[in-house]
Each structure stands twice: as C-alpha cells, then as structure tokens.
Image: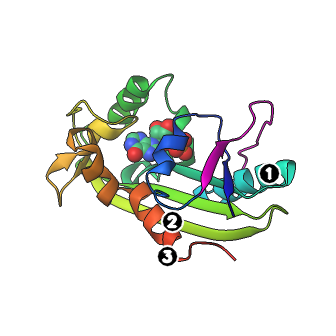
Amino acid sequence: MERLVVATGNPGKIPEMAVYFEGMALELALKPPELEIEETGTTFMENAELKAAQVAIALGEWAIADDSGLAVAALGGAPGIYSARYGGSDGDAITRLLRELGDNPHREAEFICTLAVARPDGAIALRAEGQCAGEILMAPRGTGGFGYDPIFYVPEVGLTFAEMAPAQKDAISHRGRAFAQLLVDWPPA
Ligand code: IMP
C-alpha cells in the first residue's frame, strides 16, 4: 500500500495522522470533498468502519477512518458519538457538559478513539481502539488542544489535556493509544 485515503473532510486530520505514520513511505490523502459519507452508526467503531468502507468502495482505494469522543459515566456515556455536535462551538459544548454535570461528585470520564482501515473493496482489514481515563473538572484549565481538552484532567499526569505539550498528550491520549495498537499489525494484509 502506497496511498491511504483518510475518510474525512477535515484537512487537519492529515498532519495529525501523519505523525503516527512517519517514516513509512505512505502518502495520506484527503477524501474528495464531493464524496459525502454517512456516519449513521451507534458506536464509535461502527462509525469508523462505515466511513472507511464507504470511501474505499467509492474510490477503489485503501482508506482509513477514525471516530472519537468523550464518554462521561454520570451522563450515561454522553456526549459519546455526539461529541462533535454537543454544542455550536467547542466552548458551547464545554458549557453544556459542565451544566449537565452540575456539582455531581462523580466526574469520571473517558476519551475513546477508534480506527478502521478498509481494503479497496470495502472489507475492514484492521481495527484499533484506544482509551484515556480522566475526570471532568468544575472549570476549564489550559489553552492548548481542542474540543473538551480544557476540562479533561488526567490524574496520572496531574494536568488537563489542554495543559499538556502536544507530544505529552499524544503519548497517553486515546488517539495515541489507538494508533499504537493499529501499528502493531501494520501493514494490513
Ligand atoms: P472526531 O471523531 O475526531 O471528529 O472527534 C469527535 C469529537 O470528539 C471532536 O469534535 C471533539 O469534540 C471530541 N474529541 C475527540 N478527541 C478529542 C481530544 O483529543 N480532545 C478534545 N476533544 C476531543
């Protein structure tokens, strides 16, 4: 495999993924913008598989997709697969999550990242999943990262994701762990 199409319309995903495939003569390409993909699954893995398979079949090429989000135990796993649509902006989503959690002392949460790689015929060749356990703070801390990073505190490090240097976050994050698992079986047969 020389080229891998990333099943996303977000150009930022290419450099993000390139970090993990560094040194592997592999060209990562963005899916064509006119190709619409459906994300109708009920789990992170189902969504990653759906996205990778749809793009692979449409283009007749190898494709990779990720699906990730935050699951808060006291909210029954919300925002979960709806993490990206929980607020109009990252700030709104944080405000909504903090409001819904209120002063509930049970603040355990988990970031989850799933990855699926599809063959040109759409069959799933590889799957991987990574988790990172943490707690939701009462108020945001830190300025780095994106999404829910400022309210996600990792006790083993003593920092929020937004307070960590990018390499420090990659080393322990759900995404870093998912890619580490994926690369154990790389390249797919
Ligand atoms: P996606 O599946 O990578 O598009 O991520 C879905 C959503 O989950 C994002 O829009 C963020 O709201 C949230 N999310 C996923 N990973 C992270 C992270 O590492 N930090 C903060 N938020 C994240």
Q: Residue at 85% x, 54% y: name it.
A: 60
- Which quarter of the picture shows residue 173? bottom left
Q: Position of residue 157 (x, y in %)?
A: 16, 56
Q: Is residue 4 among what the camera can see?
A: yes
Give the quadrant of the C terminus.
bottom right
From the image, give the main secondary structure of the stretch colored magenta. loop
Pointer 3: what residue? 184
Gap in angstroms between the C-alphas marked 2 and 1: 20 Å
**Amino acid found under the numbered disc labelled 2:** Glu
Helix, strand or loop at mark 3: helix
Please tell me how crowded label 3 is: few (under 14), some (14-19), or many (20+) other residues with Cα within 10 Å. Answer: few
- The correct choice, above or below, for 53 with respect to 80 in the image is below
Residue 142, located in which quarter of the rendered image?
top left
Which residue does the image show at 61% across and 48% down from the upper left? 28
> What range is drawn magenta here?
26-42
Residue 109 left/right relative to 24: left
Around disc 2, counting alpha carbons within 10 Å, would you say few (fewer than 14), some (14 to 19), or many (20 or more)?
many
Mark 3 and mark 2: span between their CA atoms? Answer: 12 Å
- Colouring rule applied to residues: rainbow
Q: Earlier in the sequence, mark 2 or mark 1?
A: 1
Circle 2 SS class: strand
Nearer to me, 58 or 76: 58
Task: Tell me which residue sits at (81%, 61%) in the image.
Answer: 120
Position of the N terminus by quadrant = bottom right
Which residue in the structure is indicated by mark 1? 54
Q: Is residue 97 above or below residue 172?
A: above
Residue 129 got which mark? 2
